[in-house]
Image (cartoon, rainbow, N blue to C red):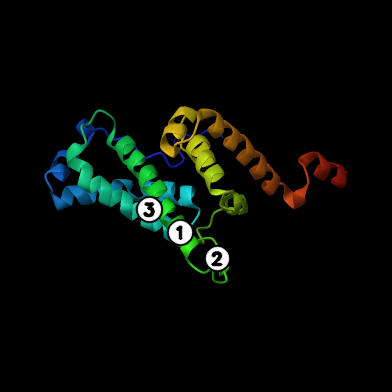
């Protein structure tokens, strides 16, 4: 299931994109080029990490604010997309933490039923999205960072402030929960075949 291209930002090193030096000088057209090239990937990453459309938009916006403020510090040692990817992850974790603390102080209201965005994706994608959202936050973060983004357990540990062993156990538990939730009607494939035949 490991995929490095699912929402990994497209690689553009400083030398490969003339917009980066211009954007560093504050050129709005160059900034727009970078935003247009990377915004959908930043949003997809934040959406996968949060499991919530509105919060993902807040996280993506925060990531872009941080990236633009820190653009002068971008040294080009890594691809711009890698640098932006890290900012998006860190911003998401920061915004998510603030939202969680704020939510703890609020009186809960009845949750409105939210339907997933209608994007014409197959039923499996909708089921997977729901299964990911049902995971506890830390498990969701680990499975997305490892299986979707392709980070190592060491990198996940550093980003989330957890031990490598904790990352591994969270991934194992998250995968087990996903398998259970994605089973049709709670049955294994073998059980389904036995019923049919």
Instruction: Give the residue displayed 36% in from the left and 47% down from the top.
Output: 91
Position of 185 with respect to 51 (left or right) is right
* Residue 18 in view, yes or no: no
Location of residue 179 by image quarter: top right
Q: Quadrant of the N terminus?
A: top right
Q: Tag 1, which secondary structure?
A: helix
- Disc marking residue 53: 1
Position of 35 with respect to 160 (left or right) is left
User: Residue 163, how many percent across, how many down?
Assistant: 50, 31
Q: Quadrant of the C terminus?
A: top right
Q: Marks 3 and 1: in contact by CB < 8 Å? A: no
Label 1 or label 3, whichever lies nearer to me, is 3
Q: Which residue is mark 2?
A: 114
Instruction: Give the residue displayed 46% in from the left and 28% down from the top.
Output: 154
Q: Tag 2, which secondary structure?
A: loop
User: Residue 3, how many percent across, how many down?
Assistant: 50, 34
Instruction: Give the residue displayed 42% in from the left and 46% down from the top.
Output: 45
- Disc marking residue 59: 3
User: Residue 43, how many percent across, how many down?
Assistant: 39, 51
Front position in the image: 28 or 51: 51
Label 2 or label 3, whichever lies nearer to me, is 3
């Amino acid at each position: 299931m490991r995929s490095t291209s699912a929402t990994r930002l497209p690689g553009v090193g400083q030398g490969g994109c003339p917009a980066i030096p211009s954007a560093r000088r504050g050129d709005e057209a160059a900034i727009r080029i970078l935003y247009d090239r990377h915004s959908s990937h930043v949003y997809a990453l934040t959406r996968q990490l949060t499991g919530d459309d509105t919060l993902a938009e807040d996280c993506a916006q925060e990531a872009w604010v941080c990236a633009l403020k820190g653009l002068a510090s971008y040294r080009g040692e890594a691809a711009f997309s890698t640098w932006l990817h890290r900012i998006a992850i860190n911003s998401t974790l920061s915004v998510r933490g603030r939202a969680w603390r704020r939510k703890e102080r609020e009186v809960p209201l009845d949750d409105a039923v939210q339907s997933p965005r209608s994007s014409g994706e197959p039923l499996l994608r909708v089921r997977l999205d729901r299964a990911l959202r049902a995971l506890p936050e830390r498990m969701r973060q680990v499975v997305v960072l490892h299986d979707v983004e392709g980070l190592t357990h060491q990198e996940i540990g550093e980003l989330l402030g957890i031990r490598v062993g904790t990352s591994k156990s969270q991934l194992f538990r998250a995968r087990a929960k996903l398998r259970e939730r994605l089973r049709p009607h709670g049955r294994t494939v073998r059980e389904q075949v036995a019923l049919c035949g």
